[in-house]
Amino acid sequence: MDKNEELEMGLLSEELLECLGEDFIKRSKKQNEQNEICNVLLRSYGLGIYDENGNIVGKVNLTSEDYPDYYAGSYLDESDDLVIMVTGSLDVAKKELEKVLSNYEYKISYVENSYKKLTLILEAIDEHFFKDSDEPYDNKGVYAYGILEKENRIFVDLADFDELAIKRFKETIDNSSLIEFREGIKAEELATVRPGGPVESPSGGSSIGYRVRRNGVDGFLMSAHAIGINQDASIGRTVVGRITARVLAGSVDAAFCRAGSNTTPSRTLHQERNITVSSTIQQTVITTMVLRAGRHGTSGGSITATGVRETSLSPPLSNLVRTTAIAYRGDSGGIFARLVGLEMRPLGILTRGVPGGSRSYYCTAANINSSLGTVLY
């Protein structure tokens, strides 16, 4: 550990260090560097970049059409080194990667299935869940599904994990041999009606995400499922803002709360005054360690899947990130971030999870900004 890292750790509270562990802090720097290499590659496929004002230029989410045939996913290994998976001709893959990443070091792993192929399967399943309909929502016994990059497979979490449910899925939704069925755990929207806590509304209580601007107006993010449009948000008896924009559909569960005249949104983390939230947001790869903060404190975890479709509740949400960070009722809307020194780089906000369990989902900052028209500052 260098002197800067020792200084940074010395400024953190014992509570946060105990929650995350010294290993989390030590590994964050290298993980951040490796994630940026992956971002360089994904941007070459068309993933958007952020301008100096925090607006995204390009695509927020890539589709099957964007991925080249050789690319098969990426992850961080036990040494926190970036591993880029490839398929098809190994020589072609190496040449294509060299065109983009000639100035970087990374590892290559050869697998059978391309990311394009896996994404096409996801998009076929999406047709059964993400479509306009006047009928009541039916999750079809499916709690979540997405890509397991490291395993080079698709996962489907079932409400009833038995042969009958698997057979039903194969006959009515998708029969791909690349699907791995698992026992699902139903997620919840982690807001609570219990009074008190960081943020309250007529719909219940939740957590503050992070500060943003919308159309030049200062405010902050909350979870859309926890508060309605034009409702006031309060801390104790003090009204701190009003919801003026809200999206609960597609890839987003977020609401913009316009700050009240006597409210100043802060960058300082509620649980840790030495940590500030930056205006820099980035994408991440699986196994990256993340930090969650909300009404019930902080928790650390790692990313287990990206681009996840969470279908257990209505409305179904897509392009979520699943993590092992523990969350509780009332934590909805709280920030997910990567810790870089004493700075938190926002990844998104908590939308759903298993209360007290090591499975939580966040919608990404990129999708939130795109849907709500917000920017960090």
Image: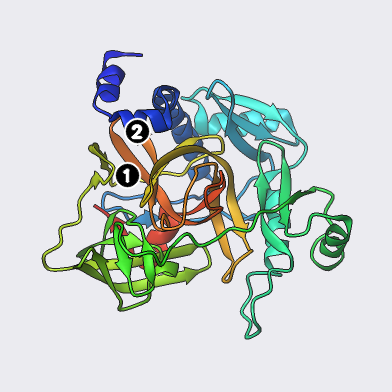
Q: In terms of secondary structure, where does tag 1 sit?
A: loop
Residue pictured at 41% horizontal, 33% vertical: 19
Kindly identify the amino acid type of the residue bearing the numbered disc 2.
Leu
Tell me: 151 left or right of 332.
right
Name the residue tied to disc 2. 16
C-alpha span from label 1 to label 2: 22 Å
Is there a contact, CB below 8 Å, between mark 1 and mark 2? no
Q: Is residue 72 visible?
A: yes
Residue sitting nearer the eye, 24 or 61: 24
Tell me: 222 left or right of 53.
right
Quadrant in the picture for the N terminus: top left
Question: Of marks 1 and 2, which one's residue comes earlier in the chain?
Answer: 2
Tell me: 342 left or right of 99.
left
Q: Is residue 258 above or below residue 57?
A: below
Q: Position of residue 54 (x, y in %)?
A: 30, 53
Instruction: Give neighbour class at mark 1: few <14, some 14-19, many 20+ (Cα, 10 Å).
Output: some
Residue pictured at 29% horizontal, 36% vertical: 343
Q: Position of residue 140 (x, y in %)?
A: 73, 68
Q: Which mark is residue 257?
A: none
The label nearer to you, 1 versus 2, is 2
Which residue of the protein is positioned furthest toward the left in this rendering? Answer: 262
Q: Is residue 58 visible?
A: no
Residue pictured at 84% horizontal, 49% vertical: 177
Instruction: Give neighbour class at mark 2: few <14, some 14-19, many 20+ (Cα, 10 Å).
Output: some
Residue 15, image quadrant: top left
Tell me: 299 left or right of 256.
right
Q: In terms of secondary structure, where does tag 2 sit?
A: helix
Name the residue tied to disc 1. 280
Q: Position of residue 174 (x, y in %)?
A: 80, 61
Q: Position of residue 116 (x, y in %)?
A: 68, 49
Kindly identify the amino acid type of the residue bearing the numbered disc 1.
Thr
Residue sitting nearer the eye, 280 or 144: 144
